[in-house]
Image (cartoon, rainbow, N blue to C red):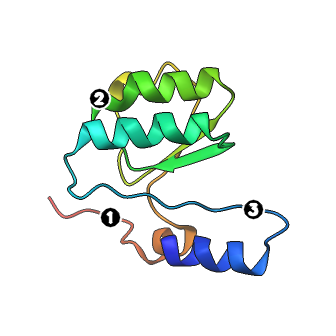
Amino acid sequence: MIAGAKKYATDNPDQIELTTLACKTNDDTPCQIAQIQDSVTKGAKAIVISPMGPGVVPALQKAVQAGVKVVFVDNTVDVWMPLPFRRRTMSRAARRRAPTSRLS
């Protein structure tokens, strides 16, 4: 996903300014909260995020209140549901390749 976003940003510099961020571990909620807050402060129009857990919700709510669009990928947080959001867990191509039935 990141490679595709970077390619799009390179090919379309007049349409998008892309910043990618990552914490050192997948459970560093304080890092992710700080990144959300910093992105809002710097004027982000959208945040595409795989949230680390419900601890990031207050920061995301403030982002939405500031007019930032929030898109979840890979993860979501149940307590987020009352707010408007868009969720994408798989690309369209991945959904086409995914099995249509489950084994029980």
Residue at the image point whose x is 58% and y is 35% from the top: 40
**Residue 59 quadrant:** top left
Snapshot quadrant of residue 104: bottom left
Q: CA distance from mark 2 to mark 1?
A: 30 Å
Observer-side mark, 2 or 1, equals 2
Relative horizontal placement of residue 20, taking residue 53 as reference (left or right): right
Lower position in the chain sequence, tag 3 or tag 2: 3
For label 1, the residue is: 101
Query: Where 11 falls versus 80 (above or below)?
Result: below
Determine which of the numbered discs, if any, sits on residue 16 in the image. 3
For disc 3, the neighbor class at 10 Å (few under 14, some 14 to 19, many from 20) is: few
Q: Amino acid at mark 2?
A: Pro
Which SS class for mark 2? helix
Report the amino acid beneath label 3. Answer: Ile
Tell me the SS state at disc 1. loop
**From mark 3 to mark 1, how far is it between C-alphas?**
38 Å
Picture residue at 63% right of the left edge, 62% below the top: 18
Residue annotated with mark 2: 54
Q: Position of residue 95 (x, y in %)?
A: 48, 68
Foreground pick, 47 / 100: 47
The residue shown at (85%, 67%) is 14
